[in-house]
Image (cartoon, grey):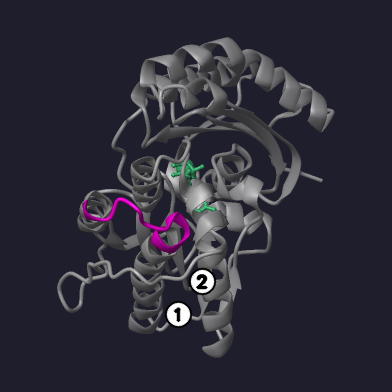
């Protein structure tokens, strides 16, 4: 039978998550314990607080993931863990737990890049078809990645300043909306018209990079000068400015690399405006599009276990000296 049963661990930010996935596709369990409410009071994730909470939760979450998968740790083939990028103190909790577990059962330990994980969330929905472009949009990342094959990543676009989710959250804060602000802007934007003029950062002619800090400053200026602005219209104007650039550059990337498969990853993939625009344009241009369900778009360990399966195939395992790397390169 030779099934590869991989336990994934993800603790790079404010979610403690453990999952059991068979052969990179079948999710037996995906336990996600969010610290959102703890950090909400601070208006953002506090690294030290996040680490401490991971320490409290990790063992219980591992137990729960095994229980829900209805297996014991001795039935596992390997342990996959997020090595980075992320908050280093938070990552260390997952890495240490993964080492202890791999050591106790004497099975391979597989380090996984967090963004590779986000991309492989799509593989849990339907098998990845290559070549593909992955649009990764989250609170920490805005990247366009070209993949020729499994575990083969070429980053062709990135943000030069704020990540797109970060821009949503900062603008929401300027508009006095609660943290995290992305979903609130999304909801308001759907009820407004993009009638306020805001800048779009296209950068150099051929560039697939992004920049959102100028747009954020423009919103700040706008609010100072127009005290009685419409929240709905400002949300719509901001969201349209962001999406115009993201959608256009994604399709430029597809054309440049002559790719017909698009996959989306990260928390901002929940944005209804982004979904609508990508669905209609991929239809127009005969491109296949995969958008994972919400619980697989945001941070979770199933995506780490799925990526871990393909790394294990390539024998990309490590020894027990594995360390977390806050700015790990893909
Ligand atoms: O992937 P994620 O859960 O965590 C990171 O790894 O960053 O992404 C969280 C980000 C937050 O910035 C949040 O505001 C944003 O995703 N977000 C949204 C929406 N839902 C979540 N942004 C825009 N529209 C949404 N509907
Ligand atoms: Zn993430």
Cα gap from disc 2 to disc 1, whole angstroms: 8 Å
Number of callouts: 2
Judge the density around disc 2: few (<14), some (14-19), many (≥20) Cα neighbours within 10 Å: many
Helix, strand or loop for disc 1: loop
Residue depicted at 69% across the width and 48% down the height: 23
Q: What stretch is highlighted in magenta?
A: 225-234
Is residue 293 in view from this perspective?
yes
Give the residue number, with chain letter if any, for mark 1.
259
Instruction: Return the residue at label 2.
Output: 262
Q: Which residue is drawn at 55% across and 89% down?
A: 284
x%, y% of residue 158?
A: 28, 58
- Which numbered circle lies on residue 209? none
Q: Residues within 10 Å of mark 1 (few under 14, many from 20)?
A: some
Question: Foreground mark, 2 or 1?
Answer: 2
Q: Give how far across and how far down residue 169 sits, in percent.
A: 40, 44
**Contact? badges 2 and 1 (CB < 8 Å):** yes
* Among the 4 quarters of the image, the one containing residue 97: top right
- In the rendered image, residue 262, in percent from the top left (x then y), is placed at 51, 71
Horizontal relation, residue 161 to residue 106: left or right: left
Locate residue 215: give its quadrant.
Answer: bottom left
């Amino acid at each position: 039978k030779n099934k590869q049963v991989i336990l994934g661990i993800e603790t790079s930010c404010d979610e403690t998550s453990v999952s059991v996935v068979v052969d990179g596709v079948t999710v037996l369990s995906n336990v996600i314990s969010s610290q959102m409410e703890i950090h909400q009071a601070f208006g953002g994730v506090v690294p030290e607080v996040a680490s401490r909470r991971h320490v409290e939760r990790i063992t219980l979450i591992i137990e729960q993931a095994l229980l829900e998968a209805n297996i014991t740790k001795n039935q596992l083939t390997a342990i996959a863990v997020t090595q980075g990028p992320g908050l280093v103190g938070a990552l260390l909790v997952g890495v240490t737990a993964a080492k202890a577990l791999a050591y106790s059962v004497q099975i391979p330990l597989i380090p996984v890049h967090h963004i590779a994980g986000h991309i492989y969330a799509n593989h849990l929905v339907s098998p990845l078809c290559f070549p593909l472009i992955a649009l990764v949009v989250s609170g920490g990342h805005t990247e366009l990645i070209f993949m020729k094959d499994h575990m083969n990543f070429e980053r062709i676009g990135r943000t030069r300043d704020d990540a797109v989710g970060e821009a949503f959250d900062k603008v929401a804060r300027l508009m006095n909306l609660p943290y995290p602000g992305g979903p609130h802007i999304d909801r308001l934007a759907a009820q407004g018209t993009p009638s306020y003029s805001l800048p779009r950062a296209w950068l150099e002619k051929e560039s697939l990079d992004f920049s959102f800090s100028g747009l954020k400053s423009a919103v700040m200026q706008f609010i100072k000068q127009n005290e009685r602005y419409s929240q709905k219209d400002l949300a719509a104007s901001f969201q349209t400015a962001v999406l115009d650039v993201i959608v256009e550059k994604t399709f430029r990337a597809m054309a440049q690399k002559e790719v017909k498969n698009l996959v989306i990853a990260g928390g901002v993939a929940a944005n209804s405006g982004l979904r609508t625009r990508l669905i209609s344009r991929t239809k127009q241009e005969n491109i296949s599009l995969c958008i994972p369900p919400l619980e697989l778009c945001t941070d979770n360990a199933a995506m780490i276990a799925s990526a871990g399966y393909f790394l294990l195939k390539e024998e990309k395992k490590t020894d027990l000296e594995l360390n977390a790397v806050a700015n790990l390169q893909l």
